[in-house]
Image (cartoon, grey):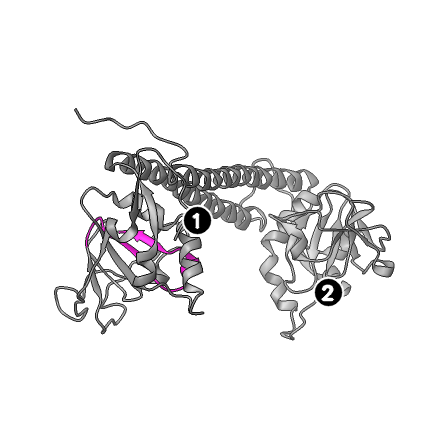
Amino acid sequence: MSNIATTDGWDDRALLDLVTIKSGQVDPREGAFRELPLIAPDHLQSRTGRLIKKETAAAQGAISGKYLVRPGDVIYSKIRPYLQKAYKCDFVALCSADMYPLTPRPGVDSSFILHSLLSRDFTNFVVSVSARSGIPKVNREELAEYRLRVPSEAEQRAIGQELDAVDDLIATLERLIAKKQAIKQGMMQQLLTGRTRLPGFDAAWHSAKLGSITTVTMGQSPAGYTYNSDGRGLPLIQGKADIRDRVTFDRIWTTEPTKTCKEGDVLLTVRAPVGYTAIVSKPSCLGRGVCAISTPRDNSFLFQALVYAESAWSLYEQGSTFTAVNSNEVRSFAIQWPSDASERAAIAAALDDADSVLRTLQDRLTKARTVKTGMMQQLLTGRMRLPVEVAP
C-alpha cells in the first residue's frame, strides 16, 4: 500500500475503483483494426507520458490479440515499471498485451490518472511489489493493492490541466532546442569550412595541422596518485567522465600534478571516446586520457573547429578494445584555418552566440523539469491545492 498523507476533502480510493481494465482482445489483422496505430511499451518515452513513435498494426506485422483503446483511455506498461511508461490516448488505437488499457470511470479525469501513474509514489509502489517475485512486471492483483487520495472531479481536472501545461512547455522547449541545435550545426558546416564567408572577409584558408598552430600537452597520471577530496590542489581531468556540457567540472583533486592546463584551454579526449572536446573551466591537472590544446588568442575558434571535426577522429581509431590516439596523431590532425585572425575571431563569436542561446534554453528546460517534479509531489498529494469553481 502506498504512503498516503491526510488531505481534507480528498477520498481514500483504490486505483481500480477509479479505472476499469479493458478485457477482450481484437485481431489486429482484421480490416477494422489493421490500419489503427498500435502502441507498445517501446513506443513510449520514459517518465514523460509522451508517445515517440506511431505505427499501424499492419506496419508492425501484428498477428496476436490486442486491446482496443479510445480517446481518454490511459495505457500503462506492465513490464519494467521502473521505466514509468504511460500514455493518455486522444485517438482510437490498439495497445499491446504488455500494457494495461485503463478506462477512467465517470467522475475521474484522464490527465489526473496519467500523472498519478507517473508519480513517484505510484512508481515506488509498483517497483516494490514487482520485486516480490523477482520479475520486473506488475500484475492485476498487485495493481489492485494501490490506493491514493482523490479530490473532486473539478480539482482532478485542474490538477491534470496544470501538469499538462508544464508538459507542453517542456515539449516546446525540447523542440526549440532541437531546432537551435540544427541551426548551429548548419552554421558550423558553412562557417568552419569556408563555404559561407562572413561579410568583409576574403583572405585565403588553408588546412593546418594542430601541431603547427597550437601547443599540445598530453595528460599523464599525477606522481604517486596523491588525490584529495577536500578541494586542495588542482582538479584532475581524466576523460569524458570529468566533462559536463562541454565544460570540465570538479571530480578528483591532486596536490602533485604532473601535467597541467589553464582556464580556457581546449580539452581533447585521447582515449575512448576519442575526440570529445571541452573548454577547461579552471586550472587543472591533466590525467591520462586527455590532452590540452591551446593557442595565444584563438582557443574559441579552435574549440568550435574541433567540435565540428569530432567524428573525424574515428579515422584514427584502430578498432581495438582499448581505443586511443597518441601525441603524434593529435599533432598531425588537420583543421581548416582562416589566415585572417579577425575572421577566426568573428566566426568564433557567431558560434559562441549560438551556444549561449542553447545554454539559456537548456537552463530553462532543466528548470521546467524541476518545477514539474515539484508540482507533481505537491498537487498529487494535496499539499498544494488549486482553486476550482464550485457548481451552483
SS of the residue under disc 1: helix
Query: Callout 1: few (<14), some (14-19), or many (20+) C-alpha neighbours within 10 Å?
Result: some
Q: Does the magenta stretch include residue 319?
A: no
Percent across and percent down for residue 342 are 67, 37
Q: Which residue, given by chain and number where applicable, does mark 1 sit on? A: 120
Q: Mark 2 belongs to which amino acid?
A: Glu
Residue 329 - label: 2
Q: Mark 1 belongs to which amino acid?
A: Arg
SS of the residue under disc 2: helix
Give the mark, 1 or 2, whose residue is nearer the N terminus.
1
Please count the marks in the image.
2
Name which quarter of the figure residue 355 lies in.
Answer: top right
Please say if 323 is above or below 177: below
Q: Distance between the residues labelled 1 and 2?
A: 49 Å
Please say if 35 is above or below 202: below
**Front-lying residue, 106 or 38:** 106
The stretch in magenta equals 70-88
Q: In this view, does 38 lie to the left or right of 6?
A: left
Percent across and percent down for residue 238 are 73, 57
Percent across and percent down for residue 202 are 61, 42
Percent across and percent down for residue 73 are 23, 52
Q: In this view, does 206 lie to the left or right of 129?
A: right
**Front-lying residue, 249 or 297:** 249
Residue 296 - label: none
Could you tell me if residue 337 is visible in this image?
Answer: no
Name which quarter of the figure residue 159 lies in.
Answer: top left
What's the residue at 79%, 55% (across, down)?
217
